[in-house]
Each structure stands twice: as C-alpha cells, then as structure tokens.
Amino acid sequence: MNKKRSFFIIILTSILLLSSCTYKGKEEKNQRKNRKNKVDIIKEKVDNMKLEEKIGQLVMVGFVGEELNDNIEKMLDNYYVGGVILFEENIKNTDQTLNLINSLKKINRKNNIPLFIAADEEGGKITRLSNIFGNMPSGKNIGELDNEDYSFEIGSLIGYRLKSIGFNLDFAPVLDINSNPRNLIIGDRAYGTTKESVSKHGIQVMKGIQSNNIVPTIKHFPGHGDTYIDSHLDLPVVDKDLKELKSMELVPFREAIDNGADMVMIGHILFSKIDKENPATFSKEIITNILRKDLNYDKVIITDDMAMGAITKNYNIGEAAIKSLKAGIDIILVCHDYENQVQVIEAIDKAIKSGELTESEIDEKVYRIIKLKEEYGIKDETIDFVDIDKVNKKMKDLKNIEKR
C-alpha cells in the first residue's frame, strides 16, 4: 500500500512539474511574441514612411521668435523635421510658451510621427525656464552638497517643470568632468572635478528627469571637461589617448549607459590621438567603435548644434552632417539659421539618392528614434493649463531637503 502511495505521489509530482514547465514555456513564448509584435509595429511604421519623412526624423531645428513663423512652419510642413529645440529667446512667459508649444504640436499632427520638443534645461546658468519657474542650482552646487537623494529630486523637478509646460526632451545632464581650470564652457555646469562626483550625481539627476517621463540626454561625449576653447566659437583639441579617456572622461558616460541612458549628445572636440582627422561629431572611431561597440550603447545619438563655430568655421555644414550620419549619429541638431537647416536636409537627400548613404542605414536610425518616442509615449497632445503653484511647492520641498 505504501509503495502504491509513493508511486502515486511521484507520478502526481511529475505531472505538476511538467505542467509548470509547459506553462512557463508558453508564458515565455507569449512574452517573446508580444515583444516581437511591438518591434514589428515600429518597423512597419518605418517601412510605410516616405523618404522625406525619414530624412526629417534625422533633423532637429531651432527658430527665432516667440511665436510660429514661416520658417518653422516650413520645417514641419515641408521637411517633416522630427524635433524642435526652444531657447530663452523663444520663451517669454507661461501663457506665451504654452501657446507656442501647443501650436508646434498642432501643426505636426498631420505628420505620422510626434515631435521631440527639447530644451537645454540643466540648472544654474544654463536654463530656459527661469522666467517662468525661477532658478535652479548649478551642477557644481549639486555636487558640493553631495546628497544623492537631493540630486535625484533636482532631476525630478527639472523633468516636472519641463513636462508641465509641454516639453518631452531635455539636453541634460552634463557628464563632463571639470578637470581643466581654463575651461570656458563647462565650469560650474559640471557636478564636480572628479569622475566619482560626476558619475554619482549626474546619474541621479538623469534618473530624476526620467521619473517625470522626460527623455534625458547625457552630454558632451566623450568629454568636454579638459578643454579651454569654447566649441561655440571654434574647435577644441584634446591630446589624450583612449586609455586616458577610459580612466577618466568616459567613466560617467559608461556608468550612465549601464543605468539606462536614453540619448547621448556628441561634443564638437577633436581627440587628436584617437582620430586626428575628424572631431568626435563625425568620428567613426569615437561614435561607432567606442560608444556603440565598447560601451554597448544601442539607443539614440545626437550631435551638438552643428551651427556652432567648431563646425561652421572649419567645415561645410551639409558635408559635416553626412559625415556625422555615416559615423553613427542618428539626429543632426541645427539650432540656428533656416538656410543651414535646409542645407543639411538637402545634403542628406542628395547623399541617399547618390548612394553615399543607403536607405537601410537611414531606416536603422529612424527606427531607434521612433522606438524612443514610443517608449516615452510621446504624442502631440496639447496642454490647457500650467499649475505654477504645484511647481512652486515642489521647489519649496526641494529647498527643505537642501537644508537637511
């Protein structure tokens, strides 16, 4: 009798284990199928886009004025650009900014893909929303306080401020290490003078921004901290080899990528011992071999503004854009001058039609861009009201953390 009972228990246990394995196998298969279906939907979108629409997704532009003008309307209507960046000159007050962003979204609704609406909102001296919400502490202030919870809350507040008025993309945080006292462009924008401080606080700010469903951008890869020429004015040169970069400048970027960085901005810097011919902006060695392969980064890469002196003083902007795309860039940022923007778009179109760029290369880039927009649920939805009091309360709560 005991033998029969034991045999029965063994058989029953085996059936239960087999059922469990079968269920888990089916569940995993369904999960893989769902992931595949989601991927296929993005690919289907890309396949159904016109060439002009694909080219537009590769370009982000700025414009002059506090309201829509003919140039930005043409960029959206005729060139299908995938993103718009706003500067302080575009932002006067709450109502005006809200109306401007809503207008951009309304115009873009006729296009198939929603807009990135971006700003350089770092805190400190690099802010676009101080007229509306007041000032935020600089990277240096954040690093000196050395409180990771505070750093996260700073990022969260930055993200909340941006989201509340209709932005969905932030060109922050800065992951450059302020290692050169002569540096004219980074300075107190950095979270410190060491890789440890920049990594610790930069990553927390990044996560805080993400917590409010704003896409953060880590910048300026592979590191702008050890320069003394402002890339807005001309091309900086850094005399460091890859081993030196890996031990210093690349550390915060590597750690941010491991922590889920969504977008990387490439700086206009020539690293003469790594690529003596090309600045990082269109260096395949830096973008593809180091960033993509060595650091295993598979998301969106964007240039710094191609209308900066580092590029326009030394290169033809259209040719530079093509070199950047061929090196592995996904989005060309052209903040200034309608003529520059048209020149870049027409150069891309010409490069594809001549075979210098293949449409399959373009499709890969567009795929990454649309995937990111879908991951963040970006839509061209307008906002009716900005709750300034709620933002102010969050800022007050943040100051209480700062005092602890």
Image: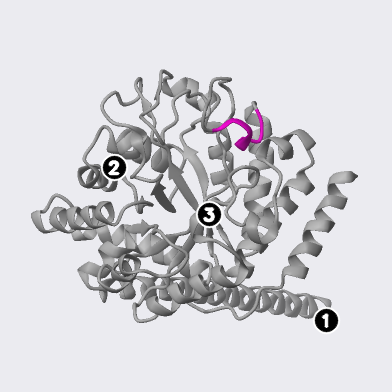
Quarter where residue 157 is shown:
bottom right
Decide if residue 29 is in sight here. Answer: no
Coordinates of residue 54 in the picture (x, y in percent): 27, 66
Give yes or no for residue 356 being in the magenta stretch: no
Q: Residues within 10 Å of mark 2 (few under 14, many from 20)?
A: some
Extreme-left residue of the structure: 354
| Marks 3 and 1, the one that precedes in the sequence | 1
The residue nearer to you, when weighing 3 against 92, is: 92
Left-right relation of 229 to 249: left
Residue for point 48% across, 52% down: 263
SS at badge 1: loop
Q: What stretch is highlighted in magenta?
A: 186-192
Residue 88 bears which disc, if any?
A: 3
Q: Which of marks 3 and 1 is in front?
A: 3
Residue that label 1 marks? 1
Coordinates of residue 131 in the picture (x, y in percent): 64, 57
| Marks 3 and 2, the one that precedes in the sequence | 3
